[in-house]
Amino acid sequence: MLISTHCHSHYSFDCKTTIEDIIEACLNSNIRCLLITDHDVFSLSNEDIEKFANKGIRILEAIEFTTSESAHVIGVCDGIKKLEKPRYHYSAREISSALKDMGGWVILPHPTHKTGLLNGKVSNEDADYCLKLADFIEIESSKYGYFDVSGVLRKYENLKPVISDDAHHKNDIGLRMNYVNVTNLDSDTDEILRKMYTSSKFFYNKKKIYPRKIKNYIVSLWLYKKVLFPLKKMLRKG
Ligand SMILES: [Zn+2]
Ligand SMILES: [Zn+2]
């Protein structure tokens, strides 16, 4: 089945996607298992989770924590709400070890972005500590593109690469997913994640990715022609 590992809902301050929109997008993309990774909260009600379950979609409870160093760390485990605190509450080291104490899983999202663990604000010792504890690291997301972590992956053999959407809009859901050989949706969280850890494959929805790439290309070309080029010309004249 396809797992989508990084998706925001309207419970995140920077996202308006409703539960119904997410369900529809998951069905369109064949996503059977979804990590809802809202910023610093896990607010899905049992009713919300049931809405997913009724459509054959398994929700894994997750939070994308914002650490005191402004780095994001995703934790996944049943009952994660217990760790809910306002943003900047935990350091990267504290939240990583709290998650492990709870038997949870740690994903390092957009690691080289300014809101990633390797943003330079997390001390080298703390980053090393988190990299050793974490289970997964994003190597690519639909939101930011590629993250150059080949050196990290060589050094920290515990880390398994995942790709994600980091979706903040319903149209962002289902571009980059992970395929895991699990058929039983009632498998427990650990079993699903253990399978993802030991044997998962990346799954790209090219039908969605390519039109988007073409659109971005046209927009950049238009920007260059209509804005940057005339501006350059104007500056040269002036
Ligand atoms: Zn993030
Ligand atoms: Zn995110």
Image (tube, rainbow, N blue to C red):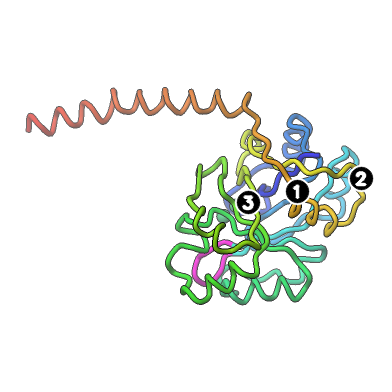
* Secondary structure found at label 1: loop
Q: Which mark is residue 94?
A: none
Residue type at tag 2? Asn
* Secondary structure found at label 2: loop
Residue nearest the observer in this picture, 208 or 222: 208
Q: Are marks 3 and 2 in contact (CB under 8 Å)?
A: no
Q: Tag 2 or tag 3, which sits nearer the N-term?
A: 3
Q: Residue furthest left?
A: 238
Residue type at tag 1? Ser
Q: Position of residue 195 (x, y in %)?
A: 80, 52
Q: Nearer the viewer, mark 2 or mark 1?
A: 1
* Secondary structure found at label 3: strand
Identify the residue position indicated by label 3 in the image. 161
Say which residue appears at 88% left-offset and 56% top-offset: 188
Residue type at tag 3? Pro
Identify the residue position indicated by label 1 in the image. 199
Residue nearest the observer in this picture, 109 or 42: 109
Ligand 1 positioned in quadrant: bottom right
Q: Position of residue 200 (x, y in %)?
A: 73, 45
Identify the residue position indicated by label 2 in the image. 184
What's the magenta region? 66-72
Q: Which image quadrant is residue 143 in?
A: top right
